[in-house]
Image: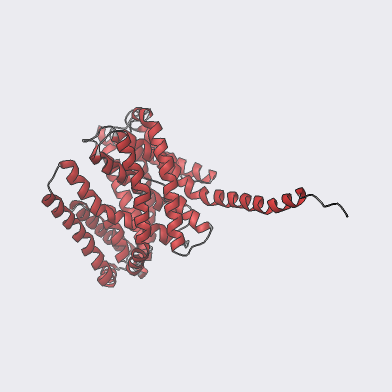
Amino acid sequence: MHNTAAMLIELGAIILALGLLGRLAGRMGFSPIPLYLLAGLAFGHGGLLPLQASEEFIATGAEIGVILLLLLLGLEYSASELVTNLKTQYPSGAADFVLNAVPGALAALILGWGPVAAVALAGVTWISSSGVIAKVLGDLRRLGNRETPVVLGVLVIEDLAMAVYLPILTALLAGVGLAGGTVTLLISLSTVGAVLYVALRHGRLISRAVSSDSAEMLLLVVLGLTLLIAGLAQELQVSAAVGAFLVGIALSGEVAEGAGNLLMPLRDLFAAVFFVFFGLSTDPADIPPVLVPALLLAVVTALTKIATGWYAARRAGIHGAGRWRAGGTLVARGEFSIVIAGLAVAVEPSIGPLATAYVLILVVVGPLTARYTEPLARRLTRRSTARTQAAPVEAERAEPVPADA
């Protein structure tokens, strides 16, 4: 009874604090994600007031938060739109890998951590945070923007690539032979392919089966189906986030719209819990020793992510401001980076604090770049244009007037 009371008190205090921080962020005109993370740092291990009774509940809530974020993203698009996006965006996915994985691998090699750690740190710097970006797109009301399908295309390619990357990394870390690694990889690819096939060929049947005139029944069926598929995907070494996204893709029409409206408040609640948990799991004392390399890596890969988004939007025929918005939106790293670092700690203990500091920097900077990259680029472009136009005038003024003969 005492533990239950303590858990309820802690949860009530956390949710109340999140509400107040969200209101403060709304008045200041920016995303509440950085404030949620700082709150998690303050109440996590090594923080001002560590939480005890509610930690396990918050960890579970954080998993649900990521799943709901990706489910709601999937509900915005149909299966045919996803396939079309993947067909057109795969060169952007390749550019994304080269621009963002290589800096992480080089940093690990420079620090002397070896090739396996280099593969792990490459993944940390490569994968953007689908959870953070989904939240930012909603906060900034950009889900209907022309560049948003481009951003989602890059994110989906990254998430699907995790079905290949994570089994390979796990095999490398465990020293598993070629045969064992190949079996794990085939299982992962088969799972993703099967779910995507069902979403494409039988999406209407699924929507019809899930549909209900009762809001209560619709909520229970969609939420239960999503958690079930996400759990099975996770069990088969595929990201739970990918499973949830594909469930959202499989639902369409009125079912998707109704489920989205019902699940949105739950998404907002559990997404906030996810960001708090991320801060809770970080000991602030581990950050200072690795802050400088993490900061340098964050600066480099923030710029390469902006370049990735700009290139992807340019390939999609989006002009000007949309390119910069796409680039700025992709900067945040998050849940996958922490998972990868957690796997690699056994090989190189220093990768844990470095990855944590790196992700914390970019998960705070990411919502800011999403909001301000485009206005900053527009301002710099105006200044450059003004200087270019002013240069001929100055040259004309400086040109000597020939004397009359």
Q: Residue furthest right?
A: 405
Q: How many numbered marks have been drawn onto this rendered protein structure?
A: 0
Q: Nearer the viewer, residue 33 or 183?
A: 183
Lateral position of residue 329 relative to residue 219, left or right? right
Q: Which residue does the image show at 21% across and 52% down from the upper left?
A: 234
Q: Nearer the viewer, residue 356 or 257?
A: 356
Q: Residue furthest front?
A: 405
In the picture, residue 81 is in which quadrant?
bottom left
Q: Split into 4 quadrants, where in the image is the N terminus?
A: top left
Q: Nearer the viewer, residue 343 or 109?
A: 109
Q: Split into 4 quadrants, where in the image is the C terminus?
A: bottom right
Give the colouring mode of the picture.
secondary structure
Residue 357 placement (x, y as % from top left): 37, 35
Lateral position of residue 369 relative to residue 254, left or right? right
Residue 179 placement (x, y as % from top left): 11, 52
Residue 169 placement (x, y as % from top left): 22, 46
In the picture, residue 189 is in which quadrant?
bottom left
Q: Which residue does the image show at 19% across and 41% down from the upper left?
A: 173
Q: Which residue does the image show at 39% across and 32% down from the upper left?
A: 291
**In this rendering, does residue 59 appear at all?**
no
Q: Which residue does the image show at 19% across and 61% down from the upper left?
A: 190
**In this rendering, does residue 92 appear at all?**
yes
174, above or below 199, in the image: above
Residue 225 placement (x, y as % from top left): 25, 60
40, above or below 164, in the image: above
In the picture, residue 35 is in which quadrant?
top left
